[in-house]
Amino acid sequence: MSQFSVILITAPPPMVPADGNPATAKIDGREALLRSVELFLNRDPIKQIQLCFTPDFVEEGKRKFGGHLSFSGVKVVTGGPKWIDQCAAAFEKLSPDSTHVVVHDAARPAVPYDDIDALLEAAGKHPACALTAPLRSALFEVDDGGNPTALHPPLRFVQMLLPMCFSRAKFEQIVKSRQDPHASEFTLVKGSGLNVRVSGGDAGLIKAMLNLLPKPKVKPPSSPFEEAQW
């Protein structure tokens, strides 16, 4: 049976410009990174969760969030400043029992529960999987000066979302080569367009997205005694 380790990254993902530390932005009074951690709690296949802070933030991060993370069984790892640096740092602490690695952006707290289920299921069959969402509008291609050079139909593109999931061997290859997999190596798993990354001034938008997410299915009590405990 597949066993998953989760790595939550606070550095900006590849091809995404740095914009401060959006993982610490508060969404309805609670930081995005804490909400992102909770996406992966209480899931049977997930055996380990690590949260990566950059060296310049790790002491502040431990002071602010250490109690909550420790209570949830989340380990803090230091690495950076780049995304791949944090992946490499977490790889060194990877549980030996893990067969797969989930990599998630800690600034993306609005991921439907069922999307993560679908990703984990696909990961059991493919070495590299990524959540995606369809585009609804045509795309302008622009040059370095922002001038339009081409127009593309939306059906040729999908948004790359997070989390992604890799087999342990594939993740080790990524970390050691420090190169992202080619696009053709991914199996794409359709996800929700509500899964957006926090950026400056987006707290209200992300709160609205969270309210729109479908509620996870609650496992019914297996016996009257278990029901009575509640």
Image (cartoon, grey):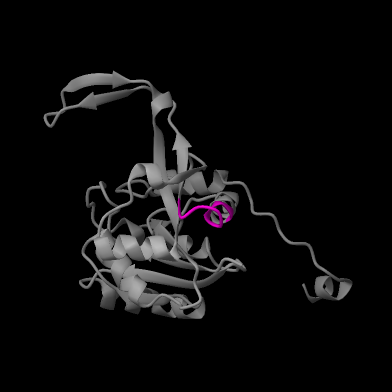
The N terminus, quarter of image: bottom right
Q: Residue furthest left?
A: 145
| Residue stretch in magenta | 121-128
Q: Is residue 39 left or right of residue 84?
A: right
Work out whether residue 135 or residue 221 is closer to the camera in this orientation and state it: 135
- Determine the residue positioned at 41% across, 58% down: 104
- Determine the residue positioned at 41% across, 60% down: 103
* Picture coordinates of residue 99, whole percent (x, y): 50, 68
Above-or-below relation of 91 to 119: below
Residue 32 appearing in the image: no
Q: Is residue 63 left or right of residue 36?
A: left
Q: Is residue 32 left or right of residue 98?
A: left
Q: Decide whether residue 40 is among the magenta residues.
A: no
* Picture coordinates of residue 41, whole percent (x, y): 55, 67
The C terminus, quarter of image: bottom right
- Determine the residue positioned at 37% across, 76% down: 76
Q: Residue furthest right?
A: 224
Residue 1 appearing in the image: yes
- Determine the residue positioned at 24% across, 19% down: 150
- When asked about the image quadrant of residue 148, the answer is top left
